[in-house]
Image: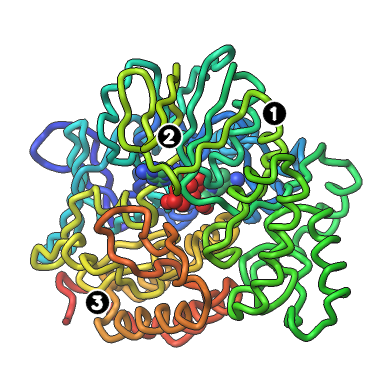
Amino acid sequence: MSQTKETSPPSTTREPRQIDALIVGAGFGGMFMLHRLRGLGLTCQVVEAGTGVGGTWYWNRYPGARCDTESMQYSYSFSPELQQEWSWTERYAPQPEILRYANHVADRFDLRRDIRFETRVVSAHFDANANRWTVTTDKGDRISARYCVMATGCLSNARLPDIKGRDSFQGATYHTGHWPHEGVDLSGKRVGVIGTGSSAIQAIPVIAEAAAHLFVFQRTPNYSIPARNGPMTREYEHTWKADYEQRRAQARMTRNGILANFNDQSALEVPETTRRRNYESRWVTGGTTFMASYNDLITSKAANDTAAEFVREQIRALVKDAKVAELLAPKDYPIGTKRICADTLYFETYNRDNVTLVDLRSSPIEEITATGIRTADHSTDLDAIVFATGFDAMTGTLLKIDIRGRDGAKLSDKWEAGPRTYLGLMCAEFPNMFMITGPGSPSVLSNMMVSIEQHVDWITDCLAHMGSRQMSVIEPTQKAEDDWVAHVNEVASKTLYPSAASWYMGANIPGKPRVFMPYIGGVGRYRKHCEEVAAKGYEGFMMAGGRSVAA
Ligand code: NAP
């Protein structure tokens, strides 16, 4: 189905290199997209900023980094051979193992020959006369592609907070999302960690083992469930592999793409003793699927309170110093409305003599100085500062690229008041530009592997459909986009999510619009909807075969 005869790849010539599909990013989304589009016979180029594949697992190498979705579920399902042959060593795979897996996939499917590493896309402009995207990179490449697929990841734009004096610190500084590849030796050092989100909660117990003293600068405490990680048993692996196809199929139709023993009962319809037994049993089993204990934990405050209070009780039991325990127990937002965490000995770490919790609520950071961090009532001397301060999530990486659609429309203008998409897959005015796990799709609320595969397969089917009908341009209608945005907002408004100042809401970035960005309607429901859209001839999309798209 190749529509473009590929030209050789000179990097700085005037004539752009002509290909069918340009894919931005070589994480799990970009790699699979490349594999699928090659299967359609398209000429493809992936552009990747890192020196290797793996996306988020390439960049996030901080101590303790691991996935908190179980290994047997956090992997590709598209190749029965791959999923049967690959063996995970732990219940939750550590980052180096996931990166090995990504590299294995790249080798096995011979992906590297179409990936240009150490190169960043800086602009993507749509030419409505040619119906092609012209993409430029920081290496001077100009590439002309019929389709542009943004596989840029949801959490790929690491964010350093604007704290006064941030760059004056004379010691070492690190961001968890940009951890040095050669590793960092923190042994014997006085280390400050700013932040207590998922990354910090994984890193803190490991850093505490090495550091002379660890100071944790906490603004908002987080709910965390013990991961109960451990070695993968051959029996457990076997039960999955013996039934993989069916389990994968079931997972695709769940609420968040994870088989999680979801209890479809209200927390309020069972007696307190039953509820407690359920929470206790899930606490012992461990993992973020604690939120699957009842069906109304994210819709009913009263139901949510029962789970939140249970977790607070566990924190109080784990942390010996009652004052510290109280500071670590979240109270001002419902459990699950900021991303719930899974940990290994996180709360217990605060019982160590070499760990101090610094409460920024009572004494905010005023300044980073040459020697450490000064809060309103204390100065702490440090050798190293670890920023575990998160990401400009979901939109940040896309908006760093100068993306212009029809008539020069800028994506940054279109999304000024928050992201607007149809199905999280495409935007009106931006023909032939697809997003993998874009805002408006379940994305970060789901098992990313499941959502990535669903998007990649949908895009592939869509391009095959277009190819078979001599169509070469696709764009959502404005109405379809408006209706979808309204639906995404409506569904979110029926949950407790908007009540928390989370990165889902853009609340971690000063000035970012407060809009709930992912789609909370559920992975299974969303998949069905996308399938129906396709079955109805790509309802809500305009397709054209010529050189222009009808508005
Ligand atoms: P995050 O959840 O956004 O946490 C950032 C932390 O930094 C928060 O505690 C935040 O406090 C704090 N912070 C930010 N600016 C600050 C400032 N100026 N002063 C003091 N504190 C500040 O980021 P993350 O931990 O990197 O996690 C991001 C997401 O990545 C997760 O939610 C998850 O989706 C994903 N992730 C997944 C895994 C996994 O699968 N295991 C692991 C790590 C990350 P406030 O809350 O007060 O803003």
The residue sitting at 45% across, 36% down in the picture is: 194
Decide if ligand 1 comes within 8 Å of the CB at mark 2.
yes
Nearest to N terminus: mark 1 or mark 3: 1
Query: Where is 261 relative to 64, above or below?
Result: below
Is the residue marked by circle 2 packed among few (<14), some (14-19), or many (20+) residues within 10 Å? many
Which residue type does callout 1 highlight?
Answer: Arg
- In this view, the residue in front, 163 or 96, is 163
The residue beneath circle 2 is 387
- The answer to which quarter of the image holds residue 507 is bottom left
- Name the secondary structure under disc 3: strand
Q: Residue 544 carries which label?
A: 3
Position of 524 relative to 55 (above/below): below
Residue 516 spot, x, y in % from top left: 40, 69
Kind of residue at disc 3: Ala
What whole-number distance in Å separates the C-alpha atoms at marks 2 and 3?
48 Å
Say whether residue 281 is left or right of residue 479. Answer: right
Give the image quarter of residue 490.
Answer: bottom left
| Mark in the foreground, 1 or 3 | 1
Circle nearer the N terminus (1, 2) = 1
Distance from disc 1 to disc 2, alpha carbons, whole Å, reads: 21 Å
Q: Which of marks 2 and 3 is nearer the N terminus?
A: 2
Quadrant of the drawing holding the C terminus: bottom left
**Whole-percent x and y of residue 410?**
15, 61
From the image, tell me which residue sits under label 1.
352
Tell me how the rendering is colored: rainbow
Question: In the image, is 72 to the left or to the right of 518?
Answer: right
Q: Are the residues at dot 1 and dot 2 in contact (C-beta closer than 8 Å)?
A: no
- Could you tell me which secondary element the residue under label 2 belongs to? strand
Q: Give whichever of 61, 494 is nearer the camera.
A: 494
